[in-house]
Every structure is written in C-alpha cells, then in structure tokens.
Amino acid sequence: MADVRDPQASGFLDRQTAFPMHPIRLVAALVMAASTSLLAAPRGEVIDIEADRLAEYWVPEKTSVSGTHEPARRRSGAALPQAREVVLRFVIDARGRIRDVEVIDSSPPHADHRWAVTMLKLTSYVPAESNVRRSAVRLVSTMTLRAPSTAP
C-alpha cells in the first residue's frame, strides 16, 4: 500500500483510504462535483441567462395568467393605445417571485405597456429539477398582447 506522504507513489491518492485513485475515477468525480454546481450561484447573487434557458432554472406554476388592467388615460380622458409587444428585463428570485422589472422597449412606442408588467408580476415560478439551490436569474423576455378569445 502506498503512503500518502510518499512522493514516489504512482497515481493519484484517495486521501480517505490512501489507495491509488485511477485518473478516470478522479475525472468522473470532478465532473460530478462540477455538474451539481453548474446552476448554482452564491446565495444572494443573480445569474444572467437567455430567455431560452429559463426552463433549466424555473418553471411557471401555471400555464396561463389572467388579470385585469385599467388602461392609462390622456389628460383628455381618452385611453392610451395598448402596446402590442413589450420587452422586459426582470429577476426571478430564490422564492420564484418576480422583482426588479424594467421595460426595455414597447411597440408601438409610447403606448401603454403597464399591462405587461401587471401580468408578469402575477406569474410565479417553481424551481426546475436542476435548480436545487433555487438560484435567482435575470433575463429579458418579450410579452405579446393577444386579443381575448371569443369562446361561446
């Protein structure tokens, strides 16, 4: 048996058993350790991700969200047109709640985009299986206003 203190010992040593560790076993152990922390950020930090990677971290609790929104009005009392598309940057925190919402863009410009912020804040998320540490994420996403369905 090789002594841990022996600089002439060949191979890597398993510190618990002082037996030579095969290099492939060492690589496999390192890969497994790294994969468990791939989606982890230190507590309190936010990971910036692309919107298409959201499902790796968080999954919406519900498939759709509905709510009401009172449109903004001009001084004349006329309602502002509703933005059809709104680009938002936001954070999903460690509890699956939306925070730090910023409107990046809306179409048409200067239209009422508050409906998108309202609907986004009604959404809550649960962690994906790979997000064991419940890492908070920041992403940019586009919301599109659809006309209400006319179901009978």
Image (tube, grey):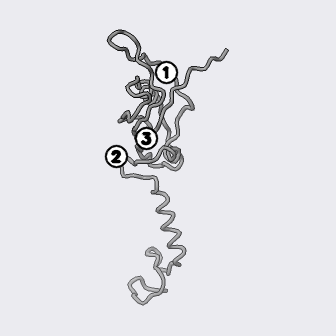
Disc 3 residue type (three-letter): Val
Element carrying mark 1: loop
Mark 3 crowdedness (10 Å alpha carbons): few <14, some 14-19, many ≥20: some
- Residue on which the image places disc 1: 67
**Quick one: 95 or 8, which is closer to the camera?**
95
Measured along the vertical axis of the image, is residue 27 above or below residue 49?
below
Residue located at (46% from left, 56% from top): 38
Measured along the vertical axis of the image, is residue 49 above or below residue 91?
below
Q: Position of residue 2 (x, y in %)?
A: 46, 86
Measured along the vertical axis of the image, is residue 40 above or below residue 101?
below
Q: Earlier in the sequence, mark 2 or mark 3?
A: 2
Element carrying mark 3: strand
Name of the residue lying farthest toward the right: 152
Residue located at (40% from left, 23% from top): 112
Task: From the image, state whether disc 2 or disc 3 is nearer to you.
Answer: 3
Task: Kindly identify which numbered label has been placed on residue 132.
Answer: none
Measured in 3D between alpha carbons, the distance from the residue under mark 2 to the one under mark 1, in whole angstroms, is: 31 Å
Measured in 3D between alpha carbons, the distance from the residue under mark 3 to the one under mark 1, in whole angstroms, is: 22 Å
Element carrying mark 2: loop
- Dividing the picture into quadrants, the one containing residue 79 is top left
Mark 2 crowdedness (10 Å alpha carbons): few <14, some 14-19, many ≥20: few
Q: Earlier in the sequence, mark 2 or mark 1?
A: 2
Measured along the vertical axis of the image, is residue 64 above or below residue 44?
above
Task: Kindly identify which numbered label has been placed on residue 44.
Answer: 2
**Quick one: 76 or 4, which is closer to the camera?**
76
- Residue on which the image places disc 3: 140
Disc 1 residue type (three-letter): Gly
Q: Position of residue 65 (x, y in %)?
A: 52, 27
Q: Position of residue 19 (x, y in %)?
A: 49, 80
Residue located at (40% from left, 48% from top): 48
Whether pointer 2 and pointer 3 mark residues with C-beta atoms closer than 8 Å, the reply is no
Disc 2 residue type (three-letter): Gly
